[in-house]
């Protein structure tokens, strides 16, 4: 099976020798079928999507946990058929082992960072490759490795990291800001650390996910300096909905390559658009 793929095998539970089940009364609903799981280094967004299908309940991921999903791969192999809820719990346990907190509340499942055992910070993209090729690539590769090492050292000093990213931001207008490419990369690679003082909570309206609500936003903090206010609801990033983990990961992936980042928010019931230009 190729990496990241998953397979679900559904097992019928008819008793042998029953001579057929015969017609069922119209009002009778078929019992949920047991399932076995074979995930080999699966993408966590796919893993959560499978859990959501098994449970038939929404699974919402807050922004800090979402940033950590990029660093995780999940392997769960349960060849024997399991009840669907038990199978979903096996998937959740695999994610909890990576520092995520998953709880059920109000008919849905909420995924956040486990502050007692937080996920290991992501390595900056390409850092390992740069290190491996430094001997053959000369001074340019060595410089890249040094930059990676500097970013890694910043990750262990949250205050220095925060100040580095703050210095990379400038205001163009209340709704438009600029950030350096390096500042953006540091921000995206270290969101769980940088946004630890904020609360980013998935929000549901009429039973459907509609975005994430921001709490604990300070005017002099990173979110405040990027134009956000306490209580804002983020609904779309780069034109992409945040309703599912897959869509949210697509949005955050698009940010990394963008020169102009657009964020659609609702502020006290009024739609607004924030713009961040990457310099």
Image (cartoon, helix red, strand yellow):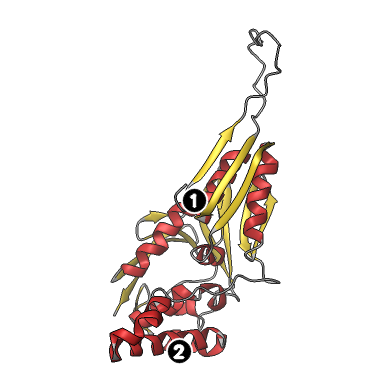
Position of the C terminus, as image quadrant, is: bottom left
Residue at horizontal 50 percent and vertical 84 percent from the top: 220
Residue at horizontal 56 percent and vertical 77 percent from the top: 193
Give the answer, above or below, for where 221 lies relative to 42: below
Of residues 33 and 175, which is closer to you in this image? 33
Q: Indicate the position of residue 158 as horizontal and vertical percent values.
A: 56, 85
Q: Indicate the position of residue 5 as horizontal and vertical percent values.
A: 47, 48
Give me the disc on residue 193. Answer: none
Q: Indicate the position of residue 275 as horizontal and vertical percent values.
A: 34, 70
Label 1 and label 2: CA atoms lie apart by: 34 Å
> Crowdedness of circle 1 by 10 Å Cα count: few (<14), some, many (20+)?
some
Residue at horizontal 45 percent and vertical 87 percent from the top: 149
Of residues 95 and 114, which is closer to you in this image? 95
Of residues 164 and 172, which is closer to you in this image? 164
Q: Is residue 252 left or right of residue 233?
A: left
Q: Indicate the position of residue 253 as horizontal and vertical percent values.
A: 39, 63
Secondary element at image label 1: loop
Q: How many marks?
A: 2
Residue 175 visible, this orientation: yes
Secondary element at image label 2: helix
Give me the disc on residue 244. Answer: 1
Mark 1 and mark 2 lie on one chain; the one further toward the N terminus is: 2
Residue at horizontal 56 percent and vertical 40 percent from the top: 53
Give the answer, above or below, for where 52 lies relative to 160: above
Q: What residue is disc 2 on?
A: 150
Nearer to us of marks 1 and 2 is 2
Give the answer, above or below, for where 217 lies relative to 232: below
Residue 171 visible, this orientation: no
> Crowdedness of circle 2 by 10 Å Cα count: few (<14), some, many (20+)?
few
């Amino acid at each position: 099976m190729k990496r990241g793929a998953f397979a679900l095998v559904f097992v019928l539970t008819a008793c042998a020798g029953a001579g057929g089940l015969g017609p069922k009364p119209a009002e009778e609903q078929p019992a949920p079928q047991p399932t076995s799981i074979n995930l080999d280094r699966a993408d966590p967004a796919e893993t959560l999507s499978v859990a959501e299908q098994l449970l038939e309940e929404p699974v919402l991921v807050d922004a800090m946990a979402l940033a950590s999903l990029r660093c995780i791969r999940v392997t769960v192999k349960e060849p024997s058929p399991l009840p669907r809820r038990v199978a979903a719990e096996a998937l959740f346990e695999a994610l909890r082992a990576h520092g995520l907190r998953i709880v059920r509340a109000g008919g849905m499942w909420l995924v956040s960072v486990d502050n007692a055992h937080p996920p290991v910070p992501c390595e900056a993209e390409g850092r390992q490759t740069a290190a491996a090729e430094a001997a053959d690539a000369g001074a340019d590769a060595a410089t890249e490795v040094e930059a990676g090492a500097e970013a890694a050292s910043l990750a262990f000093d949250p205050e220095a990291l925060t100040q580095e990213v703050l210095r990379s931001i400038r205001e163009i207008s209340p709704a438009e800001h600029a950030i350096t490419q390096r500042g953006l990369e540091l921000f995206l690679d270290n969101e769980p650390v940088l946004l630890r003082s904020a609360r980013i909570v998935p929000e549901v309206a009429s039973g459907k996910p509609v975005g994430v609500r921001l709490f604990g936003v300070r005017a002099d903090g990173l979110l405040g300096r990027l134009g956000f206010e306490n209580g804002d609801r983020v609904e779309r990033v780069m034109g992409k909905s945040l309703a599912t983990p897959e869509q949210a990961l697509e949005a955050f992936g698009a940010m990394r390559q963008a020169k102009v980042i657009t964020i659609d928010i609702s502020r006290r019931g009024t739609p607004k658009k924030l713009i961040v230009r990457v310099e």
